[in-house]
Image (cartoon, rainbow, N blue to C red):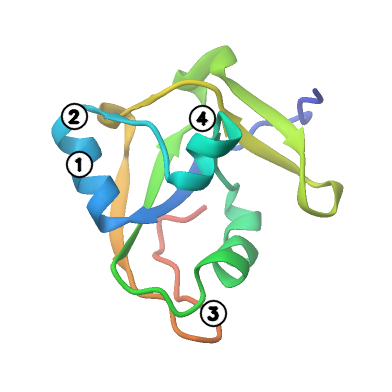
Amino acid sequence: MVTPMRTPAYIYKVASREIYDASLAAGNFTGQPIDLKDGFIHFSSASQLGETIRLYFAGLAGQVLFQVPAAPLGEALKWEASRGGDLFPHLFGPLPMSTVSNMTPLDVPADGIATLPEWVE
């Protein structure tokens, strides 16, 4: 596993509103079905987020986008090669919902090109 030279301050996740709301009630986010299957929670950096949304969420309504500070996740957050060899943040373990710093509803148009909020940095 490779760690980038400079870890971004924030990482991002798109999830269904239903799973997000259930996670709030439970206190922890354990992931979407793909995360549960893969054994870790897939996140994106700000620079990866637009392409992730386009590839995996095009045409989906009822989603949420949320931001998480990377530093508090410690060693559970690993940067691993994925799409195109780019290093993606993967969280090995549940995400405490108390760490979510921003959230917004997200309905992704059919072309997958979503307008991202100003807090995506």
Question: Looking at this view, is 90 or 117 the one in front?
Answer: 90
User: Which is more foreground, mark 2 or mark 4?
Assistant: 2
3D distance between C-alphas at marks 1 and 2? 6 Å
What element does badge 4 sit on? loop
Q: Earlier in the sequence, mark 2 or mark 3?
A: 2
Residue at image coords 54%, 38% = 37
Name the kind of residue labelled 2 in the image.
Answer: Ala
Please tell me the numbered disc located at residue 22: 1
User: Which is more foreground, mark 1 or mark 3?
Assistant: 1
The crowd level at tag 1 (other Cα within 10 Å; few <14, some 14-19, many 20+) is few
The crowd level at tag 4 (other Cα within 10 Å; few <14, some 14-19, many 20+) is some
- Picture coordinates of residue 36, whole percent (x, y): 48, 35
Contact (CB < 8 A) between labels 3 and 4? no
Q: Is residue 10 visible?
A: no
On the image, which quarter does residue 49 sit in? Answer: bottom right
3D distance between C-alphas at marks 1 and 3? 27 Å
**Quadrant showing the N terminus:** top right
Q: Which residue is mark 3?
A: 113
Please tell me the numbered disc located at residue 26: 2
Name the kind of residue labelled 1 in the image.
Answer: Ala
Contact (CB < 8 A) between labels 2 and 4? no
Please tell me the numbered disc located at residue 118: none
Judged left or right of residue 5, residue 57 is left
Name the kind of residue labelled 4 in the image.
Answer: Ala
